Image (cartoon, rainbow, N blue to C red):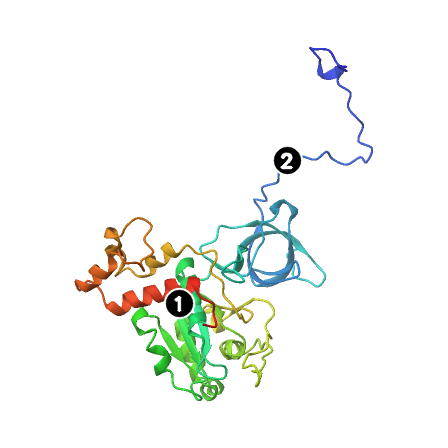
Amino acid sequence: MRRYGKHTDEDDVRVRPNRKGNRPRTSIRPKHEDAAEGFVLTVDRGRLTVLVEDRAITAMKARELGRKSAVVGDRVAVVGDLSGKKDTLARIVRVEERRSVLRRTADDTDPFERVVVANADQLAIVTALADPEPRPRLIDRCLVAAYDAGLEPLLVLTKSDLAPAEKLMESYGSLGVPYVVTNRQELADGDAADRVREQLTGRITAFVGHSGVGKTTLVNALVPDRQRATGHVNAVTGRGRHTTTSALALPLPDNSGWVIDTPGVRSFGLHHIDPSRVIHAFPDLEPGTEGCPRACSHDEQDCALDAWVAEGHADPQRLFSLRRLLATRERREGD
């Protein structure tokens, strides 16, 4: 039964009174044009530490952002109490467009992507030359993730007092990846930190590596006024213990750049990466793919890259490196 006639007027429509006396809901959201710019330093259980001008403030994500989350490295718009005083809380109302996003998955079968950091320029892959032993497959996976995210990779080899770097670098020379070799004594003297710092100037650099490689020890040497807890390597398992539990952005001395220390990883899944994008990291090989069959994996009998390299257009080692990186998508890190 129709409550109202066919041609109802506004005055004929019954409106329930607002018993709570509050304003009715609206889908129109404020633009927050006066919001302050901030840089996310760390995230901890729903609370974010954000640098606004020269103050570190505590903030939470506004409801209107929905499922969109902010991560370390994000540029955000913040409103509310921006004094940075104790027990004050601001709101993040907007996450600005990201220049780069470094992602990983738990393994190659996990479809859930985890954003490691945003807006980084460089990925420093930290690996020990001994204690624990290097894991080349994990290095390869980090390289693939860096190329896919548009980050420049940097290898930082620690503990050279326990093993030489030459053997490991034989595998990466053809990739043209810059590297720095360090040891404990040089870190204590400051020499190693100075060499690494030269590679970080003017950039936002994310540091990744599995537990026990000396990543946090290196970060502490780079940013001596912000000491983070360090751990040790288990003598039985050969693995390190997680001491860094959340990512943290730290400014280099004289604000010459940023270091983002991330928790140690034991796996670096690449489920989210389309293997066809890896070729973009090899500009010397990419022109040779024009003769490849459609959807070529670049590791099959009809791949045009074999003829391209045989004709002298590129170094065979470069093709070998490409195929090795592509193969990491199908391997487990411990292989």
Residue type at tag 1? Pro
**Up-down relation of residue 8 to residue 225 (above or below):** above
How many neighbours does mark 2 have within 10 angstroms: few (below 14), some (14-19), or many (20 or more)? few
Q: Which mark is residue 153?
A: 1
Residue at image coords 80%, 35%: 21
In this view, the residue in front, 140 or 261, is 140
**Quarter of the figure that contains the C terminus:** bottom left
Q: Which mark is residue 223?
A: none
Residue at image coords 39%, 67%: 153
Q: Position of residue 314 (x, y in %)?
A: 22, 64
Q: Position of residue 76 (x, y in %)?
A: 55, 53
Q: Earlier in the sequence, mark 1 or mark 2?
A: 2
| Extreme-right residue of the structure | 19
- Mark 1 or 2: the one toward you: 1
**Up-down relation of residue 114 to residue 187 (above or below):** above
Q: Which residue is mark 2?
A: 27
Q: CA distance from mark 1 to mark 2?
A: 44 Å
In this view, the residue in front, 43 or 52, is 43
Q: Is residue 2 found left or right of 230 in the rendered image? A: right
**Quarter of the figure that contains the N terminus:** top right
Q: Position of residue 128 (x, y in %)?
A: 46, 80
Q: Quadrant of residue 225?
A: bottom right
Q: Secondary structure at mark 1?
A: strand
Q: Is residue 145 found left or right of 30 in the rendered image? A: left
Q: Is residue 121 visible?
A: no
Residue at image coords 64%, 35%: 27
Q: Is residue 22 visible?
A: yes
In this view, the residue in front, 104 or 49, is 104
